[in-house]
Image (cartoon, rainbow, N blue to C red):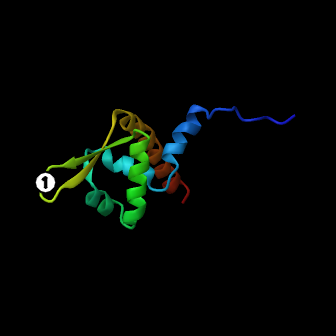
């Protein structure tokens, strides 16, 4: 008999739906140091396109991982910050980065 996946995603699958998008872990990584403006995130992650960055930020906002705030500046600017839930993803991303570093350097 074949093993069937459960009807609902397991917690790992749910988390990976958030982290699985291209550039998503990078966005969370850069926001882990504090709020950033769109242009700062774009510079941090060059060669990401503005279209892709905008799309990822919208997805993360919809999932409750980041907050988007319009600042009362002239001209107005937008700042992004991790929510409490988004902050809970940071240790997982740090752990992945640590293992990635070891894989990169120990496979030589």
Q: Position of residue 35 (x, y in %)?
A: 25, 46
* Residue that label 1 marks: 73
> Along the line of sight, which residue is nearer the eye, 105 or 6?
6
Instruction: Locate residue 69 relative to residue 17 in the image: left or right.
Output: left
Image point (49%, 56%), residue name: 22
Rendered view: 7 above or below 40: above
> Along the line of sight, which residue is nearer the eye, 93 or 38?
38
Image point (12%, 58%), residue name: 74
Instruction: Locate residue 37 relative to residue 26 in the image: left or right.
Output: left
Image point (34%, 33%), residue name: 84
The furthest residue to the right? 1
> Along the line of sight, which residue is nearer the eye, 48 or 62?
62
Instruction: Locate residue 9 relative to residue 18 in the image: left or right.
Output: right
Instruction: Locate residue 32 relative to residue 106 in the image: left or right.
Output: left
Q: Position of residue 92 (x, y in %)?
A: 45, 39
- Secondary element at tag 1: loop
Quadrant where the N terminus is found in the figure: top right
Q: Position of residue 47 (x, y in %)?
A: 39, 67
The furthest residue to the left? 74
Quadrant where the C terminus is found in the figure: bottom right
Image point (40%, 50%), residue name: 58
Rendered view: 48 above or below 25: below
């Amino acid at each position: 008999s074949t093993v069937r996946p459960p009807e609902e995603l397991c917690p790992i699958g749910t988390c990976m739906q958030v982290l699985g998008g291209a550039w998503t872990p990078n966005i969370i990584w850069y926001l882990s140091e504090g709020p950033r403006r769109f242009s700062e995130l774009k510079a941090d992650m060059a060669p990401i396109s503005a279209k892709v960055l905008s799309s990822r930020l919208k997805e993360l906002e919809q999932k409750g991982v980041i907050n988007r705030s319009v600042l009362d500046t002239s001209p107005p600017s937008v700042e992004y910050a991790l929510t409490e839930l988004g902050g809970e993803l940071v240790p997982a991303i740090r752990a992945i980065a640590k293992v990635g570093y070891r894989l990169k350097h120990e496979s030589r």
